[in-house]
Image (cartoon, helix red, strand yellow):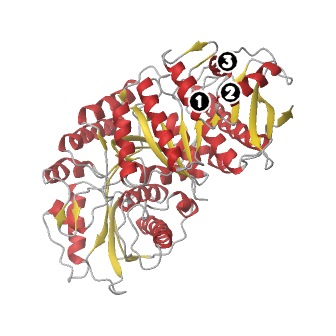
Amino acid sequence: VGHPGTCRVLSIQSHVVRGYVGNKSALFPLQVLGFEVDSINSVQFSNHTGYAHWKGQVLTAEELNVLYEGIKLNKVNHYDYILTGYSRDTSFLEMVVDIIQELKKANPSLVYVCDPVMGDHGAMYVPEILLPVYRDKVVPLADILTPNQFEAELLTGRKINTQEDPLSALQVMDLLHKMGPETVVLTSTDLLSKHGDKFLVALGSQKLTKPDGTNSNQKICMDIPKVDAVFVGTGDLFAAMLLAWTHLHPKDLKTACEKTVSVMHHVIHRTITYANDVAGPGKRPSPAQLELRMVQSKADIENPSVVVEAKVL
Amino acid sequence: MECRVLSIQSHVVRGYVGNKSASFPLQVLGFEVDSINSVQFSNHTGYSHWKGQVLTADELHVLYEGIKLNNVHHYDYVLTGYTRDTSFLEMVVDIVQELKRANPNLVYVCDPVLGDHGSMYVPQNLYPVYKNKVVPVADIITPNQFEAELLTGKTISTEKDAVEVMDLLHAMGPDTVVITSSDLPPRLGDRFLVSLGSQRHVRPDGSRTTQRVRIEVPKVDAVFVGTGDLFAAMLLAWTHHYPNDLKTACEKTFSVMHHVIQRTISYAHDLAGPGRRPSPPQLELRMVQSKADIEDPAIVTEATVIS
């Protein structure tokens, strides 16, 4: 596996004292793969909000700016990647946009990996006013985007016809490309998998400029085994690992996605096995028991055996 | 290994101090690390500039309450380091006491950061809090010579003095004491510094025994930040794996430090260029690059058992 050298990521996400979401989900795997990760914690909570209780504090847009100012004053505001995820605050998100614009001026090759977290299964779980900020300001800056089907539909204003094979999904991804990002991965869709209803379909599309100046577009499709449990933090892990594997396989979305999805599979599988063991027979595991088995999955993170193949469309 | 650590330390956006220094190496060694960030700063305070926000004692309490309400306040270890605020430190003590009630086997690893080279670099009013409240609930402490002298009121001029100071520290609470650095004359020459460790055990028959070790560590001509935090975290890890063998735990811990520091100083000099002193950003620990050494440190420093 190639070493990323001195590749520096700025990750602006939540911090939880216990468990693996946001920066807690992204940092360890990226560090294990050799990336230098600077992290700004947008909130500090005791744990994720799927537990019975949660408590903590949020960072304001102004406080975010102060932290960035510190980095800038020391002239160390040079990053190869930025990674962002779940956000609830429009002014915070707009400050993130300002910071990214400035970082892109400092390094025009910077790659912004954006998970446009807004909702799932037909409903938004962030304030509605975030949609225009994502659509008009965030996504145009993004280079890699990891929406689920619902988020892709919201951003483009276009519904994906799940009966129509992948065609309408591919069209929505093309619309997303036009908005900005060269790499789009639809992390989950309601499309029917040819392997049956125990699988979900994910799609990826990457626009590349060939050395001769012409454009090419690789599109891939993956059938991913569904898991009968609610995990939190998996989207954050996905975006972080997609960052890593597209970095290590920059013109090969097929391989990048196979590795990313395979890491997810190993971590989730280890987690569900452990959770079921801890909960006991016939009992549904609790959110605490379902925390990702992240440190236990180090070897899989470092060198994931490929267990899901991507088909080039 | 199912071992959960609660680490209450600083967070910096960039670089490796506090929780940034402790979490990755502990996670790489398979520990589950819950972390409460006592501050969030852009970088450590050795840079030209630094900016950020601090957590109040109340906010710390609120976070702990969240953990407690979910009934997940069960830890095998607590780890603390640099603090500037007495009310925050007192809240930490309350939390540690409650966690010890929840798990009487909990081990509290405490770096009593007060100062170095003869002067305090935290507010003076922290000293009585450490002495009267924190150290008595600690199980493992990692003072430097200045901090050990301050806490016991006794100066160290000889190895015999150091042994007496460590015995005084044992009497205050902790069964394991490592004086991380001292001005004692090294046998290996002036390019080394002397560290000492002492661990008290109770034999099955109820009698007490103390293992004492002396380690000579190569000096490095640079100012590192975050090394003390890495040291405490790795001492936690290696005493966990070698609970009755302070010699081996120290050899592994000091060896990891050596590898990380060597890698860091080489890199920093490369970056700075010939004849130039590296800057604080250039001297940030090469933590992620040292993963293999963290996982399985080749022993490069031997500890001598002393009486």
Q: Chain ID for label 2?
A: B
Residue B182, percent from left and from top: 72, 21
Q: Amino acid at mark 1?
A: Val
Residue type at numbered disc 3: Glu
- Who is closer to the viewer here, B24 or A18? A18
At label 2, which amino acid type do we have?
Answer: Leu
Image position of A264 with respect to A93: above or below: below
Q: Does residue B272 lie above or below A101 as drawn?
A: above
Label 1 belongs to which residue?
B135
Spatial distance from mark 1 to mark 2, Cα to Cα? 8 Å
Q: Which residue is mark 3?
A: B149
Q: Estimate how packed mark 2 is, as few (under 14), some (14 to 19) or many (20 or more) residues with alpha carbons within 10 Å.
A: many
Say which chain tag 1 marks: B
Going from the N terminus, do you reach mark 3 or mark 1 first? 1
- Quadrant placement of the N terminus of chain A: bottom right
Q: Residue at x 26, y 57 (%)?
A: A117
Q: Quadrant of residue A76?
A: top left
Which residue is outermost to the top? Answer: B118
Query: Are dots 3 and 1 on a single chain?
Result: yes
- Taking the image as shown, residue B116 lies to the left or right of residue A281, namely right
Quickly name the residue at label 2.
Answer: B169
Circle 2 — which element?
Answer: helix
Taking depth in this image into account, of A278 and B184 the one nearest to the observer is: A278
Q: Residue at x 80, y 34 (%)?
A: B212
The answer to whether any part of residue B73 appears in the image is yes
- The one nearer the camera, A281 or A17, is A281
Discs 1, 2 touching: Cβ within 8 Å? yes
Query: Tag on residue B58?
Result: none
Q: Are marks 3 and 1 in contact (CB under 8 Å)?
A: no
